[in-house]
Amino acid sequence: MGFTTRFAPSPTGQLHLGHAFSALLAFDMAQEAQGRFLLRIEDTDTARCTPAFEAQIYEDLTWLGLTWETPVLRQSDNTSAYETALTQLGDMGLLYPCSCTRGDIRRAMSAPQEGAPMHGPDGLIYPGTCRHRVWGDRTDTDAVRLNMKKAIDSLTTLPLYTDTGLHPAIRLTRDHFVNAVGDVVLARRDTKTASYHLSVVVDDGAQGITHVIRGEDLATATAIHVLLQTLLGLPIPMYHHHRLIRDDHGKRLAKRDDARAIAHYRSEGATPRDIRRMVGL
Ligand code: GLU
């Protein structure tokens, strides 16, 4: 099996040292394996992504010494592939439309019989208000959710994956998916675009990604991705969850941490070699 990996940033802010680490690590691993390194722009969140941030991604990565194959896949150009995957899952009877706002979900969760609200990888675990609705009744103002119980029960065996990085692969059990993940959103109601989970899985499959190299903060999302790959009949790549780059207080870096932005270090005269040293490569 060849080695194909990708770096998949969202142009919603400046790339920081954590992104530099992830991109350099993936690039180095691809070089070492004499494999392929792809760049993918994850810009389905049209409200937060900007062309200026996208341009800066190319600039920062080029400055770091990375090269990638072109053309670059931009998720905003690929929406019909996500809609096809959605239809596939919808036709399997695993999806339902959902009109709940965050406020509706919070109110349903605070109803006296509900007990303490449970958080999953995407926030509050959905209480199931719209679960009775059918896929065919989807309207323009609905989000689309995966019926997790039905999805798990449609499989004869639960998916498995390998993690070659730090994070032990999460044990994928029915209980984990139903109680700790819940009915995740696969298409958003605000932007009417595919959610991160669906678009990543469709693109990793279409681009023949064999190794996904990402921060360990995404390990809980990986479990959802492996499930979606199984439902859609896509190959399951190897996963490598790497350590996170943290600030001096041990907090993981966020896009608003401009002081840690690659562009900031560059403007202060740092070299790409300095950046490699700072992230421990
Ligand atoms: N686009 C996402 C991010 O910037 C995720 C990348 C991935 O799926 O590995 O965090």
Image (cartoon, rainbow, N blue to C red):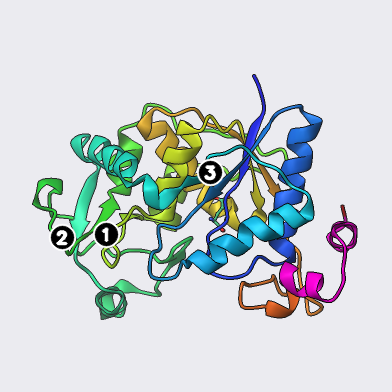
Residue 90: percent from left, percent from top? 21, 41
- Neighbour class for label 1 at 10 Å: few (<14), some, many (≥20)? some
List the residue tagged with mark 1: 192
Q: Nearer the viewer, mark 2 or mark 3?
A: 3
* Residue with the most extreme top position: 1
First in sequence: mark 2 vs mark 3: 3
First in sequence: mark 1 vs mark 2: 2
Taking the image as shown, residue 85 lies to the left or right of residue 31, namely left
Q: Report the amino acid beneath label 2.
A: Asp
Q: Nearer the viewer, residue 115 or 91?
A: 91
- Neighbour class for label 2 at 10 Å: few (<14), some, many (≥20)? few
On screen, residue 141 above or below 169: below
Taking the image as shown, residue 156 lies to the left or right of residue 99, namely right
Can residue 113 be seen here? The reply is yes
Residue 272: mark: none
Q: Nearer the viewer, mark 1 or mark 3?
A: 3
Q: Residue 84's image quarter?
A: top left
Residue 140: mark: 2
Residue 67: percent from left, percent from top? 70, 43
List the residue tagged with mark 3: 72
Residue 218: percent from left, percent from top? 58, 55
Ligand 1's quadrant: bottom right
- Neighbour class for label 3 at 10 Å: few (<14), some, many (≥20)? few
Q: Report the amino acid beneath label 1.
A: Lys
First in sequence: mark 1 vs mark 3: 3
Mark 1 → mark 2, Cα distance in angstroms: 7 Å
Quarter of the image with the N terminus in it: top right
Q: Residue at x 40, y 63 (%)?
A: 45
Which region is colored magenta?
Answer: 261-280
Mark 1 → mark 3, Cα distance in angstroms: 23 Å
